[in-house]
Amino acid sequence: MQEHVEELISSYIDGEVTDDERQLIESHLQNCNQCQVLMEEMVTMKNNVFLVYEFVEIPQSFEENVLAVIGADQTAKDTLRIKMSWFVFTFFIALTLIIVFALSPIGIFIVSLSSSVFSIMFSLLRVIPTLISSVPQLLVGISIFFVVLFVASTWFLRRLLFVQKVT
Ligand SMILES: [Zn+2]
């Protein structure tokens, strides 16, 4: 009677034995009921471990994470789609209004008016630096004016808010 092969059974199940070891184990298992039972138990145990790994570990961590990622991605996509559709909708409404407005007589009048206003503003903007550089006191005067305006408006706003709070 050969020695029992219990130390080799685990490796044998995992396929981690040499050809000589496999032949030894298989011939022993044919004659030894004790080692056969041990091997069956080990196979069952390994299968259970695999099943536990497959049905507990993977679905709870991996699959749920993947689903969560897909779900989050889907929500982000939906939000983006809604935003994009609103953007396209607003864009087409604005474009239609601009075309209708530009083709109407009032639109043509406003366009010509705004273009003339724009040209006046542009010429003023070109004049202002020349004016400031020629008169440095004007810059100081403008600065003081804006500071005074800011302080006055802040004071007025605070007063207004205080009055509204009281009443
Ligand atoms: Zn045995």
Image (spheres, grey):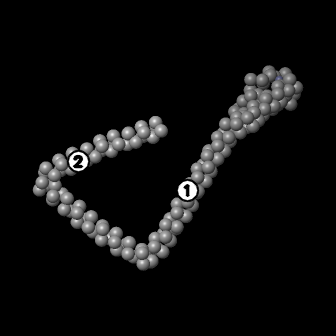
Q: Which amino acid does label 1 sit on?
A: Lys
Task: Report how many numbered discs are placed on residues in the image.
Answer: 2
Along the viewing direction, whichever of 68 and 105 lies nearer the viewer: 105
Rendered residue at 70%/35% (across/down): 57
Ligand 1: image quarter: top right
* Tag 1 residue: 83
- Picture disc at residue 145: 2
Query: Callout 2 environment at 10 Å: few (<14), some (14 to 19), or many (20+)?
Result: few
Camera-nearest label, 1 or 2: 2
Quarter of the figure with the N terminus: top right
Q: Where is residue 105 in the image (x, y as percent from the top left)?
A: 42, 78
Q: Where is residue 82 in the image (x, y as percent from the top left)?
A: 58, 56
Q: Where is residue 109 in the image (x, y as percent from the top left)?
A: 38, 75
Q: Which amino acid does label 2 sit on?
A: Phe
Asked if residue 40 is positioned above or below residue 124 in the image, the reply reads: above
Q: Where is residue 89 in the image (x, y as percent from the top left)?
A: 55, 64
